[in-house]
Image (tube, rainbow, N blue to C red):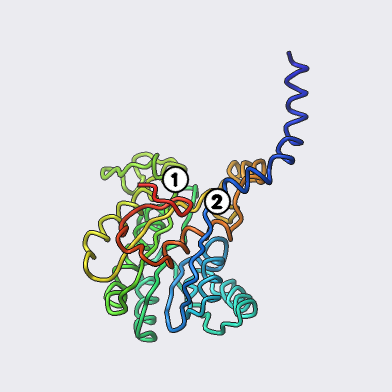
Amino acid sequence: MIGILLLLLLLLPLFLYIAAPQIRKMLSSGVCTSAVQLPGKVAVVTGANTGIGKETAKELAQRGARVYLACRDVQKGELVAREIQIVTGNQQVLVRKLDLADTKSIRAFAKDFLAEEKHLHILINNAGVMMCPYSKTADGFEMHMGVNHLGHFLLTHLLLDKLKESAPSRVVNVSSLAHHLGRIHFHNLQGEKFYNAGLAYCHSKLANILFTQELARRLKGSGVTTYSVHPGTVNSELVRHSSFMKWMWWLFSFFIKTPQQGAQTSLYCALTEGLEILSGHHFRYKCIWF
């Protein structure tokens, strides 16, 4: 029996290698096929200096939009902006400081953006943290809830009038399938009574979806529509705080999406024509999840 198990373990890598292309193709289904071009449009993408955010910003720039990379790490953002400019030929790729763990930084970003731009057509709330050790934002919020939800909540609120003035416009909130494990514990919002890094991430992703639904309800008839998305399991820096998750990502790397593949659902919700009627819905791999 032990010999059979050892044989299976030895053959597993070979099976994964052979089956990986077909499985990856299946898991990465859902490509944004919209031909919409964006000359004259303005977009903001948070966390655009890496991963899904970077690929999303690149595609928007490729289509002619003026794109703001809202990043905590400005130096890294500048390198990415230059890369996107070279690849797309679009010089209207700008970097601005945004630390979602500090409401002063969020307010400063919004103030400067509103003074600089007359329009905002696409806001993609993409940045996030995952499974980080217990810590709090500059304002005392548990880090997952503070960055993933409350930071984007405040940013959206501050830019909402500009979105309305620029209608039709869209807000895309990047959530996760992990929201199914999320709960909103009002008696423990800051994780001070009990804390689990994995569940804290799930709670914040549920908050993203609830925010999207309520925002859609309140904005009905305004010309601003909003969507939440599950991008899939993507090879990105999001797992940097967890050695276990990094190991799992490495072990199943054959099946994990590239950042470009992961960006497709965000792009689908930001670009696809006729999607307004589905404002408030949650999308997974370009399909309606609920």
What is the CA distance from the residue labelled 2 to the residue labelled 1?
16 Å
Q: Residue at x 32, y 79 (%)?
A: 166
Identify the secondary structure beneath mark 1: helix
86 vs 51: above or below: below
Secondary element type, mark 2: loop
Instruction: Give the image location of residue 176, x and y in percent.
Output: 44, 49
- Single out the residue that lies furthest toward the top: 1
Amino acid type for the residue under numbered disc 2:
Ser
Of the pair 263 and 207, the residue shown nearer to us: 263
Compared to residue 39, the image places residue 229 above or below, namely: above
Residue 213 placed where, x, y %? 28, 55
The tally of labels here is 2
Closer to the camera in the image, 49 or 19: 19
Amino acid type at circle 1 is Leu
Horizontally, residue 247 falls left or right of residue 203, namely right
Q: Residue under circle 2?
A: 29
Q: Which residue is mark 1?
A: 177
